[in-house]
């Protein structure tokens, strides 16, 4: 696979669409060890964000990891280790779940599990954590169960927005199936997974083609999306879109030091399951209450909160810290996610220290905008 040097002796990995991004004048940056497009020259983050909310956007997210677990009892094996309950879904369905540390309950990664059968599960973790998740699973896999890191076996293209269905239909691809379900098809002679999911809050799909046909699929999707003034979109817009929805991003709202209870993603935990990594410590934290709790913040004045800023109460006491922050193109104001003292209630007025200046904010429960992936 092609790589790019960072100039410091470390090579950045490249997706199969790297040449396409270059031809489109993309601004590229390191993201999880991959050279990824942040925005494109002819559009920019704001226009790309708008395209997804109003029409359709096409993202290269091939940096995401892929791990195949195959063999007798694959589903049961994964279910006993990841947090969510795979027995709630069946073949042809996907599920958001977490890989937690057995000792601390902190989130090693959040990922999507695709159930093909009781003996075949595909996991899609984050780029930087794929090897770690695969290693943890392989270390406990019994004989006869294969855990395979297939990071560069599949590309991933996200098609997101109100015109996502029409974009896929233009290529003769399946559309309209239920949220978090997927369809296996053959495209250009190779397998393609079409899943009704995404990370923007809009209706959309994530497509997992074979690595070698990913460029051809991208070209066709970009051509089809143009019919509705759709755009190729970079990770800058992906971040503003997910922040508007209050979606957690690993490395920000989820880390090995932050638990699902603190991050308010306990809905992705099968609390009644007899086994999963971190179960006992998380049950204890859930019963006692977390030391910090995820909240949303909306700026009441001019200014944009960013990640890593102190959150203060009226007396100037630090009561938390932001984990993500951005300018919301939809609301035309600053929004942030943060971990605050659990005593801080929704509706409270606080301030965020932005370069030493107090930016007034209101505590809210995300999402910040009223869209859904239905």
Image: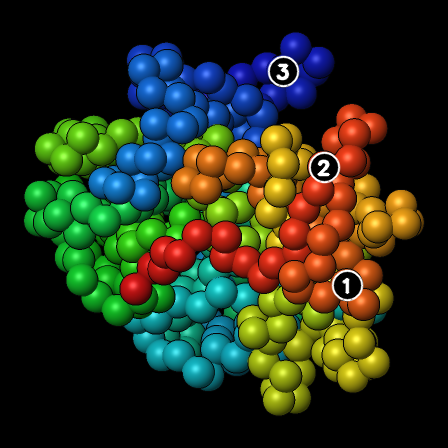
Write down the quadrant of residue 290 in the picture: bottom right
Q: Quadrant of the C terminus?
A: bottom left
Where residue 35 sits: x, y (%)? 52, 24
Q: Mark 1 — residue?
A: 344
For numbered disc 2, what is the local secondary structure? strand
Q: Is residue 189 visible?
A: no
For numbered disc 1, what is the local secondary structure? loop
Q: CA distance from mark 2 to mark 1?
A: 17 Å
Where residue 304 sits: x, y (%)? 62, 33
Where residue 5 sits: x, y (%)? 59, 15
Q: Which mark is residue 153?
A: none
Q: Mark 2 — residue?
A: 359
Counting residues from the N terminus, which is met first, the one under dot 3 or under dot 2? 3
Where residue 93 sits: x, y (%)? 34, 71
Residue mark closest to the camera, 3 vs 1? 1
Counting residues from the N terminus, which is met first, the one under dot 2 or under dot 1? 1
Write down the quadrant of residue 94 in the picture: bottom left
Q: Mark 3 — residue?
A: 6
| Circle 2 crowding by C-alpha within 10 Å: few under 14, some 14–19, many from 20 | many
Relative horizontal placement of residue 122, taking residue 250 as reference (left or right): left
Total label count?
Answer: 3
Q: Is residue 258 above or below residue 260?
A: above
For numbered disc 3, what is the local secondary structure? loop
Q: CA distance from mark 3 to mark 2?
A: 36 Å
Q: Is residue 69 above or below residue 237?
A: below
Relative horizontal placement of residue 336, taking residue 210 as reference (left or right): right
Circles 3 and 1: CB atoms closer than 8 Å: no
Q: Nearer the viewer, residue 71 or 370?
A: 370
Q: Residue at x 37, y 14 (%)?
A: 41
């Amino acid at each position: 696979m092609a790589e790019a040097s960072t100039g410091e002796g470390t090579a950045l990995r490249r997706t199969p669409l790297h040449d396409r991004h270059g031809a489109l004048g993309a601004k590229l940056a390191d993201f999880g060890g991959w050279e990824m497009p942040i925005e494109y020259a002819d559009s920019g983050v704001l226009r790309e964000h708008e395209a997804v909310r109003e029409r359709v956007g096409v993202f290269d997210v091939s940096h995401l990891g892929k791990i195949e677990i195959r063999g007798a009892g694959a589903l049961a094996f994964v279910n006993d280790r990841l947090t969510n309950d795979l027995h709630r879904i069946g073949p042809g369905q996907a599920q958001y779940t977490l890989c937690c540390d057995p000792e601390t309950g902190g989130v090693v990664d959040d990922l999507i599990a695709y159930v093909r059968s009781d003996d075949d599960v595909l996991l899609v973790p984050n780029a930087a954590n794929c090897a770690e998740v695969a290693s943890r699973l392989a270390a406990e896999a019994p004989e006869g169960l294969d855990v395979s890191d297939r990071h560069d076996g599949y590309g991933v293209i996200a098609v997101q927005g109100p015109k996502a269905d029409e974009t896929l239909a233009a290529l003769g691809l399946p559309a309209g199936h239920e949220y978090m379900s997927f369809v296996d098809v053959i495209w250009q002679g190779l397998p393609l997974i079409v899943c009704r999911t995404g990370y923007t809050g809009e209706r959309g799909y994530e497509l997992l083609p074979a690595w070698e046909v990913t460029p051809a699929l991208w070209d066709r999707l970009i051509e089809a999306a143009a019919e509705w003034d759709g755009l190729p979109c970079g990770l800058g817009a992906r971040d503003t879109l997910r922040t508007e929805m209050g979606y957690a991003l690993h490395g920000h709202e989820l880390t090995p030091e932050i638990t699902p209870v603190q991050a308010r993603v306990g809905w992705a935990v099968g609390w009644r399951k007899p086994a999963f990594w971190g179960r006992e410590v998380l049950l204890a934290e859930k019963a006692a209450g977390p030391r910090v709790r995820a909240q949303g913040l909306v700026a009441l004045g001019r200014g944009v909160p960013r990640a890593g800023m102190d959150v203060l109460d009226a007396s100037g006491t630090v009561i938390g810290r932001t984990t993500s922050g951005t300018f919301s193109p939809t609301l035309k104001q600053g929004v942030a996610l943060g971990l605050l003292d659990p005593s801080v209630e929704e509706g409270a007025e606080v301030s965020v220290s932005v370069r030493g200046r107090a930016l007034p904010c209101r505590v809210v429960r995300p999402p910040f905008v009223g869209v859904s992936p239905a």
